[in-house]
Image (cartoon, coloured by chain):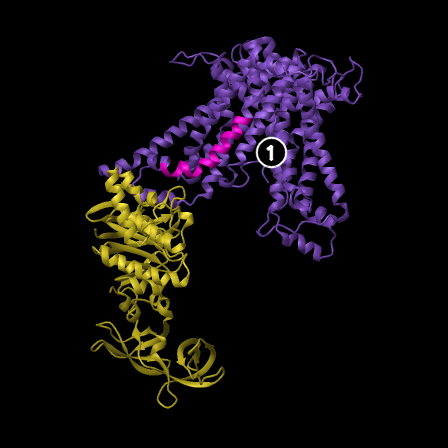
Chain colours: A purple, B yellow
Amino acid sequence: MSTRIRESLGQEMVLTAAVAVVIVLLSLLPMLRLIKEIVAPGGTFSGMAIEAGLRSPATWIATWHTLVVGVGGTLLAVLSGTLVAVLVTLTDIRGRSALVLCYVMPLMIAPQVTALAWLQLFGPASPFLKLIGAAPPLGTKNPLYSTSGIILLLGVQYGPLVFLLVRAGLRKLPRELVEAARAGGAGWFTVLVTIVLPLMTPSIMAAAALAFVSCVGNFGIPAFLGIPANYLVLPTLIYQRLAGGGPAVLGEAAFLSVLIGVIAMAGILAQEVMSRRRDYRISSTSLPAEPYELGRWRPAVQAGMWLLIVVVLLLPLFGLVLASLVPGYGIALTAKTATLDNYRFVLFEHDAASRAFFNSFWLSIAAAFFAVLVAVPIGYLIAWGKQRWVRLLNLSVELPYALPGVVLAIASLLLFLRPIPLTGIQLYNTVWIILYAYLARFLVLALRPTISGYHQIDRALEEAAQVAGAGLFMRMRTIIFPLVAPAAIAGGLLIFMTALSELTVSALLWSSGSETIGVVMFSFEQGGDSNYAAAMSVITVAVTFVLMLVTNMLAAHLPSGVLPWRD
Amino acid sequence: MARLTLDHVTKSFADFDAVKDVSIDVGDGEFLAVLGPSGCGKTTLLRLVAGFEKVTSGEIRIGSEVVSGKGGSVAPEKRRVGIVFQNYALWPHMTVAENIGYSLKVAKLDKAVARQKVADALALVNLQGLGDRRPANLSGGQRQRVALARCLVAAPSLVLFDEPLANLDVHLRASMEDEFAAFHKRTGTTIVYITHDQAEAMALADRIAVMDHGRLAQLATPRELYHEPANEMVASFISQGILLPADVLSAEVAGHCKVRVLGTELLVRCRPGERPRAGARICCRSADLDVSPDGPGLDGLVKRVIYQGGAARIEFTSSAGPDLTLHFEQPDPVMLEVGAQARLCIKSGWLIPAAGVAS
């Protein structure tokens, strides 16, 4: 083999090897470690952990609760999300982009912030209810501390998720299918029930599966609403066990986290089975159907939609802002009592809180930055590479995000409880273990838009650089990165927004000194300092909102569908 | 500048042979067109030469160096070939000058020298002063010229054109054709030009390689392809040649032999050494056919008359072979009408060599 031929192979092999190492470290290793803990704790094969877990009644109660709120939340999310998707996509309703933006907004807000906002709205200390003089007497139980409260908020949180998927499906519906039914004499409602919704079954099923996985894995909402009512689901049960028992109960926690994983997977499998029962494939592509004219119903439907937005978005946020301005629990908010002291306190005076802002910001920036950097080469190999096994690795990058966050958190704990072999570096009880978990969990958020970015680029652009003599790294730097950068960076911003107020993972991995915003918010709320928690929430929501606006400026350079809130 | 040699090159994807046992020798400074219907393997051939695909078997040499073969494959960036892509592949995030100067930047050329070379290349394609524009602000023809300049500036040993005119409108095509011809004359570069357009290939190329289902059907000059097609595929593909069954009656004498076609005997051109045989075929061009109401010829029916402005294309079937359609042109005033009886005379033709006889 001539030297020129050998040189040609070098850079691609280096890139492939580096990508493989990253994926193994971030995706395969934690999952394998978790499975090992269940099947063979301590290195020998044993069913002990499984048996102990199965015998505990707490396991069964929490599993039942998880299923109840999971199924309930999913149903509510599917019903509301599909209804909104149909109204927004198929009718001539006005102000569509604004509606989409507002309706999808709760998805960008952390679940525990949603929970906190709603709690502030309805509790006996609610500044809002006090404002309108409708507050129940102090000491009354907040109606949201209940099963139905959890289900309601899960539905509010993940309705937008269903909305996005169903809307994407509806937009691909060819108008001929609708027009043929109309020509056959069917009215609009008949078309909707007999043609549109049946054809949307795969989208709705996929959305339902995703909502189910999100509901059973959700920590923030059942933590804020369930723990005070002693209503435990699996993620909160794990949290309580670990908070009480520390690393000693890791084996049991591992079993419980795998149980959540199994429930989530069962949801996905059920969707697969349901979707395969009939042929729903749409073969033709065409323009979307003409919007249905609502006629005299339009003002009513529009008013209804905006009322929904007010209820699920504006009122809770309003309640949150009011709560952040109240000087203390139960005090009525007036022009005289309103204060910014809570903000001053969490930003500058409370050590853990200000540390948390610092930690969460740099963790989010680091995770976003790393993910963008890694997503470009991984996306390159997945979208344009020739090796098939790399595409399989794509699945393993999806895994840590597809599974509930608790699963990954426990896996990270197991992986780094002891110092890393050979180096002796200790990640457990430091902020680095959180960074590791963020990298593993959120990488896919940057990878997906990057891959769709690659699919939009003409490969000839790279080949032109290749014949101009540029090696792989040179092409990456001068041609490929500039071209996919908008998509990758948008993904990075999504990661930043998601990681900034993240709670599920950090609640299990934090230690003194490495608090995150989510963790401190949670401990404020548990300690009864809702006002401080509200102030922190308002700050993160504001940051998120500003970032959404900034990201919108990238929109012209992005493949469609990268920014969920953009129509 | 270098010669390009393809030596029994085969490329298979899974169980499908995109290129089968193709051998082509392109001389130094030659302009070779690779012509074929879509799916014939011509684009795969180009990608093999450029190095984007690896050969399954066989060998590709540029100059005296083996670039693809059993030992492996030299990466595209090390082959010093230039490509003009069908959709230009100009980098949208760079200006025209940056696009053109990219290969110089990669080669770490001195900046002042590179700037001069870019200016020269811009001048060569008549785009002086457009160096600061973005590709998005250029017309189709201008983009094509930028692509040409970009590939020129690196002084490649070999330039590949991948259907460069397919995206341009008709009148722009003619002027770009002139420009490519001028470019070849000026630089003397070896060129491999992929196209599905016969007129383009005929107008530009020194030789044309006709591809069919991954195989090389014929490699010859445009004139030879037209007058002496090596097989039925080339005969019918080039200028819609008419294939007629024939029996060879006499051995070749002075490049001609006697054949019987549809019951009439005539003299056609043929390869040296042809001997009498049955089941042969001849290829006629529409120019070889003429109406001859009085003389000898084929009697038959006019099936269709398609007026094309100034002349009509007449489709005709002879009563001796009702399944065969012969077509020819009749200039105005067009006398023949659909359903009319006519007598047609075949003035000349080419006896297609028996399969498996090498040219």
- Give the magenta range: A478-497
Residue A487 belongs to magenta span = yes
| Above or below for A55 versus A4 | above
In the picture, residue A524 is in which quadrant? Answer: top right
Q: Is residue B297 left or right of residue A237?
A: left
Relative depth, front residue between A264 and A84 = A84
Is label 1 in a helix, a strand or a loop? helix
Disc 1 target residue: A269
Q: Above or below — where is B220 with respect to B266?
A: above
**Among all residues in the image, which is located at the extreme front?**
A336
Looking at the picture, how far across and down is residue A491, in whole percent?
50, 32
Give the chain of mark 1. Answer: A
Tell me where residue B109 sits by quadrant. Answer: top left
The answer to whether any part of residue A398 appears in the image is: no
The front one of A131 and B8 is A131
In the rendered image, residue B114 lying in the magenta stretch gets the answer no
Q: Label 1 neighbourhood size at 10 Å, few (<14), some (14-19), many (20+)?
A: few
Left or right: A325 in relation to A358: right
Report which quarter residue B203 is drawn in. bottom left
